[in-house]
Amino acid sequence: MSTPKGPTLAVLPVAKGEASGAAQILQPNGWPAPKGYANGMAADGRIVVTGGVIGWDSQGYLPTSFVAQVRQTLSNISAILVEAGARPEHLVRLTWYVVDKELGQIYREVFGTHYPAMALVQVVRLVEKAARVEIEATAVVPR
């Protein structure tokens, strides 16, 4: 029998003061630490999934600027999380579809420094022609 090849996996400990059901960051040993996202996440609990969320406000208005759309989209995701009894720190995955890439500062303003596993896909356009960002989110609420 052969030994599997490849990196070993480190499960980073939950930060002091966090609930034991909090999501854990998965960081393979020897890999450089990612900046602004996690390589993987592990969590136990109730799964909350959003559809593709864009930056419409409650009146159906879609801002024209990319940064304003990102801010509103993240706020909309926060509102969906609240409906499920979740918070941004329960996010374990975000998939971003964007026509531009100015994201870091606005992300931290809305969600702080919690960085789940993320994928960023630059697209030519989205289904809603005026939309410049669409995000799918997955969160796990501890039991």
Image (cartoon, grey):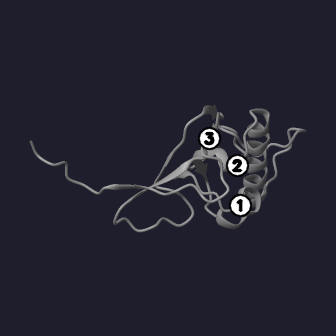
Q: Nearer the viewer, residue 60 or 74?
A: 74
Picture coordinates of residue 60, whole percent (x, y): 86, 38
Task: Give the structural element (helix, strand or loop) at label 2.
Answer: helix
The residue sitting at 80% across, 42% down in the picture is 56
Quadrant into which the C terminus falls: top right
Q: Which residue is mark 1?
A: 112
* Residue 122 shows in the view: no
Q: Is residue 27 above or below residue 139?
A: below
Picture coordinates of residue 111, whole percent (x, y): 72, 56
Q: Disc 1 marks which amino acid?
A: Gly
Quadrant into which the N terminus falls: top left
* Residue 1 shows in the view: yes
Classify mark 1: residues with Cα within 10 Å, few (<14), some (14-19) or many (20+).
Answer: few
Q: Which residue is mark 3?
A: 136
Classify mark 3: residues with Cα within 10 Å, few (<14), some (14-19) or many (20+).
Answer: some
Tag 1–tag 2 contact (CB < 8 Å)? yes
Q: Disc 3 marks which amino acid?
A: Glu
